[in-house]
Amino acid sequence: MKAIIFGVNGQDGFYLSELLAKKGIEITGVSRSGNFLKTDIASFTEVSDLIKVNKPDFIFHLAANSTTNHNALFENHETISTGTFNILEAVRLHSPHTKVFISGSGLQFENKNNPIKESDLFEARDAYSVSRIQSVYAARYFRSLGIKTYVGYFFNHDSPRRSERHMAQKIAATAVRVASGIEDKIEIGDMSVVKEWTYAGDIVEGIWLLVNQDTIFEANISSGLGYSILDWIKVCFKLIGKDYQHYIYQNNNYKAEYQQLVSNPSLINSLGFQPKVSFEALAKMMIHGETN
């Protein structure tokens, strides 16, 4: 079997490529960075040529700039929205047997601080959400044309491969520096915000489960377990035997985008998905820099 992964050099692409390789699947990786194919996902001609030649069994669209910043408006429109259309139309024309996975986000739903279900209403709350919502409607349209198109809604998930622009890694890396004797301090916004802290290596297992059945086509791929930012701070600093209060301070003027971003994972659970790495184990993994 063959697979194309768009966004292979990102966190999720890394773990997914490891999983597929273990299953003996031939992988074509596409990324703007790293030693991978530089196919422009925003170019229909380039995407179409790649799919026409490879005729893969699976395509995974994981490419995106994971930020809600308005400045990434056009970048994410081209990568997420246009990229989705290009992949699906190329599959329709040249490889209709291909199963296509499109990544979605918990951020694209209306958030009333309750566990989010796949049936909840979408909310175009930022530029990123607009692109994600459009890609889901594209997936639904092409599904009506007979293309097996799956959408996995991701909630917060992490690994040692995260950069420090992500909260979990920012805190873990600070703890590592403190443990090595470097006096480091960071400012955090609202530490009471609750979200999921699932291991990315577990999330890709959920992706694989989803695309290997033909009953459920859209599902939260998530743990449904919520912990506050303060919980994460405490577990990271406990691992290094330091009092976090000497190194972390709160910006009381910061207003969080949401108070809680937690899912209802019952659909993906019905397929047998259960994350293996606990909250504490993920913190330990990130403190020690393990990649799997």
Image (spheres, rainbow, N blue to C red):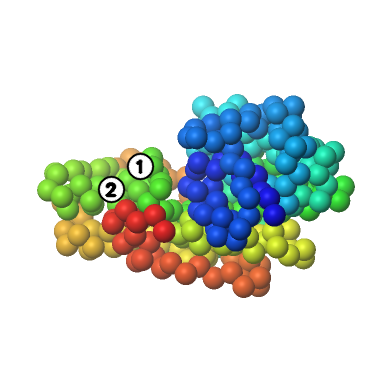
Say whether residue 196 is left or right of residue 92. Answer: left
Percent across and percent down for residue 180 are: 15, 50
In the picture of the structure, the residue carrying the numbered disc 1 is: 164
Label for residue 233?
A: none
Where 13 sits versus 49, above or below? below
- In terms of image quadrants, where is residue 209? bottom right
Answer yes or no: is residue 100 visible.
no
Where 119 sits versus 267, above or below? above
Percent across and percent down for residue 120 are: 67, 56
Which residue does the image show at 66% across and 49% down from the upper left? 3
Label for residue 173?
A: 2
Q: Quick one: 45 or 257, which is closer to the camera?
A: 45
Answer yes or no: is residue 9 visible.
yes
Which residue does the image show at 54% across and 36% down from the upper left? 36
Q: Earlier in the sequence, mark 2 or mark 1?
A: 1
Are the residues at dot 2 and dot 1 in contact (C-beta closer than 8 Å)? yes
Q: Quick one: 250 or 147, which is closer to the camera?
A: 147
